């Protein structure tokens, strides 16, 4: 019986060693699989974070589109100078004065213009206030208002000559065209 129990003990020891060996193999494979899952989870988390940022940035761009359009309306782009000058002249009609653009030139990234007006003093002053209230970076550099100008029908008018500089001018080299955001 001793021999039989000794064999049994050896078999049990061998089974235990085999079970421990299998346990070590399974443990090492589990650790390797866990490390792989952790790396892939980090990559997925990084990709998810990037996707979330792009989605948020795209949403912000769409939300700020009206603000971008408003900001661009505060500038006169190269090629749209005529509409700006027409706007300056239209203010004269609104104020009840005759307006004539006597000089217009581009100096660097600015536009300079000289405007001559004829009418009564209050209307010329009102016109100047309207021009100053335009939503552009427009500075009035010089003002000359004088009385005693005789019109074609013998009427006596006031004459105003204003030198102005438009700083909110965008030459073509600096204009960035709007591209529709892609979601």
Image: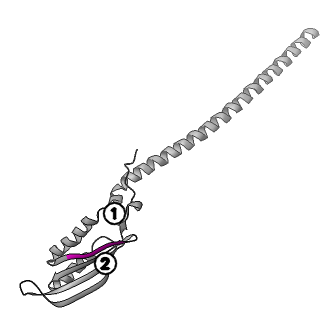
29 is higher (above) or lower (below) than 123: above
Instruction: Look at mark 1 in the image and give the residue it sits on.
Output: 78
**Marks 1 and 2 close (CB-CB < 8 Å):** no
> Magenta residues?
100-106
Is residue 69 in the magenta section? Answer: no
Of the two numbered discs 1 and 2 on the same chain, state the one appearing first in sequence. Answer: 1
Residue at horizontal 32 percent and vertical 66 percent from the top? 74
Q: Nearer the viewer, residue 5 or 126?
A: 126
Residue 101: mark in rendering: none
- Could you tell me residue 23's position as x and y percent? 76, 25
What number of labels is visible? 2
56 is higher (above) or lower (below) than 9? below
Left or right for 104, reference 108? left
* Nearer the observer, 45 or 132: 132
Crowdedness near tag 1: few (<14), some (14–19) or many (≥20) residues, C-alpha within 10 Å: some
Q: Residue at x 69, y 30 (%)?
A: 30
Secondary structure beneath disc 1?
loop
> What is the spatial separation of the Cα atoms under label 1 and label 2, in whole angstroms?
17 Å
- Residue furthest to the bottom in view is 148
Image quarter (top left, top right, bottom left or bottom right) of the C terminus: top left
Q: Which residue is mark 2?
A: 164
Which corner quadrant of the image does residue 24 belong to?
A: top right
* Element marked by disc 2: strand
Rendering coords of residue 26 (x, y %)? 73, 26
């Amino acid at each position: 019986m001793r021999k039989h129990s000794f064999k049994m003990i050896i078999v049990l020891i061998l089974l235990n060693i085999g079970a421990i060996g299998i346990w070590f193999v399974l443990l090492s494979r589990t650790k390797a699989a866990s490390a792989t899952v952790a790396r892939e989870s980090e990559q997925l988390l990084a990709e998810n974070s990037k996707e979330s940022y792009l989605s948020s940035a795209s949403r912000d761009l769409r939300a700020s589109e009206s603000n971008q359009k408003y900001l661009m309306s505060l500038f006169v782009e190269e090629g749209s100078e005529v509409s700006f000058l027409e706007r300056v002249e239209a203010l004269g009609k609104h104020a009840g004065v005759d307006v004539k653009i006597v000089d217009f030139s581009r100096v660097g990234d600015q536009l300079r213009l000289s405007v001559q007006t004829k009418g009564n003093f209050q209307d010329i002053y009102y016109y100047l206030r309207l021009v100053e209230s335009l939503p552009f970076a427009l500075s009035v550099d010089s003002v000359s208002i004088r009385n005693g100008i005789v019109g074609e029908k013998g009427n006596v008018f006031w004459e105003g000559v204003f030198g102005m500089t438009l700083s909110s001018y965008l030459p073509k080299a600096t204009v960035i065209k709007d591209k529709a955001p892609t979601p």
